[in-house]
Image (cartoon, helix red, strand yellow):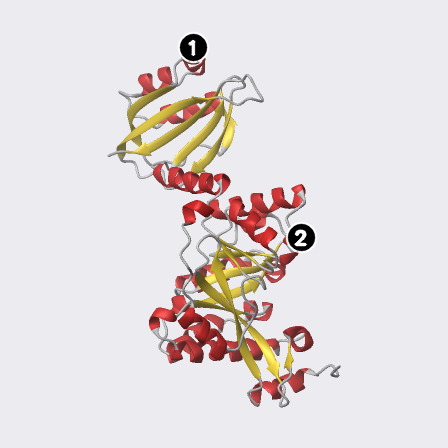
Amino acid sequence: MMYPRPTAQDVLQAIARGEIKAYYQPQYDVLSNRMKSVEALARWILPDGTVLSPGYFVPVLEQTDAICQLDWHMLREVCAFLCTQPEEQRHRIAVNFSRWHFNDPEFLARLCAVVDEYGLPHRLIGVEITESAAVAHGPDVVDWVNAVKAEGFKVAMDDFGSSLSSLAFLKDVPVNVLKLDRNLLSSNCESERERVMLESIISFAHRLDMVTIAEGVETQEQLNFLRTSGCKRVQGFLMARPMPADEYARACAEHDPEGEDVLLMQSPSSATSLLMEVVFKRFPLIILANITRNSYYMMAYENFTTHESPAAGVFDDLISTGTATMHPEDQLRFRTVFDRQNLLDLHAKGEKSVRVVTRQRGDDGVYRLVETVDYFVENPSTDDVLVIAMSQTIA
């Protein structure tokens, strides 16, 4: 049956009558199939029991800040529901917030007040914003996101890949969760270009410590690919449709996955991703250098003792910069060992690695013992001499 398009006032009156309800769509760990989080989605329940999707009534609200009334209503619905759940069955629930909230100086105070009114820890509420809204507000959204996170809420960027933003923009917006738009799965992961794009976005997001959630997963082929790509969580009809609160509560109580051994499900590529996460945690500075062509770039450069070197450039300049940060008694040894010609000679002799421990001055002016190891690596596509350099503070 076709219903006439409602006015904003019609929708606001429906909210007042309690006809707009929160439906819940779980998000699952891609390997273990365990329920990890959930998104709250608005549904209009008519007196005759008909359920209207948000596409029917949300667009008319989004034209003005009337949409904010729906957002706050949904937050209260979610908080009230969480209060009915046993603690062991509570998952973080994401609530969608419109772009209009970016212009509200009282947003954060009100957000905290509503959640605190129900006595809930802030970590149980996710604040979900769309990619297009974040792009439209540019640099201002960075401070907004940081302020929300500082109060203990998790922030998710929804529909990533639906607009024209770039990964360069994403690196500046410190969200906790990146939700991949369903359009990125439009070719059922059978297109090589689609797979490469997804793998690149997922890898980039993980290096920025973001949890990735793929939306709109509807086929086993999509799920299989996402398992191999390193995506953390999935959401879609293949696993569960949005459901009313009572049905979701039962699902939480009954959810007991068989516990299939994740190692048997782990693909080589996703296992490699896990390995890289461990390596990046172990070594705060990792450099890939082409000794033959005198170039390098930083693969990781976080929480290291000093940040004086640029992210990419000329290898000889990198060694000069590094030498200047060493203790005067260690400078000659560091410069000699990592001299480019010396590395070329060592490689020619069949050496596999070279290791040096020096005292390096940090950004705070304090000298610390730092271990640097260069590993010679082979690349079948080139005869150039390549090294991966890993550095860590040991004292």
Query: Residue 269: horizontal and vertical position, in percent?
Result: 50, 40
| Left-right relation of 192 to 158 | right
Residue at the (75%, 83%) spot, across then down:
4
Locate residue 127 relative to residue 67 in the image: left or right: left
Quarter of the image where one finds residue 17: bottom right
Q: Residues within 10 Å of mark 1 (few under 14, many from 20)?
A: few
Q: Earlier in the sequence, mark 1 or mark 2?
A: 2
Residue 110 visible in the displayed image: no
Do the residues under discs 1 and 2 have CB atoms within 8 angstroms?
Answer: no
Return the residue nearer the eye: 316 or 43. 43
Residue 316, given in percent of the width and then of the height, sits at: 46, 20
Quarter in which the N terminus is drawn = bottom right
Q: Quadrant of residue 367?
A: top left
Determine if residue 53 is in view.
Answer: yes
Find residue 104 and report its horizontal and vertical position in percent: 53, 72
Residue type, numbered disc 2: Leu
Residue at label 1? 345
User: Element at badge 2?
Assistant: loop
Determine whether the residue tagged by mark 1 lies in a helix, strand or loop.
helix
The mark found on residue 164 in the picture is 2
Position of residue 333 measured from the top left corner of the image (x, y, whole percent)? 31, 17
Left or right of 55: which side holds 319? left
Q: Nearer the viewer, residue 188 or 195?
A: 188
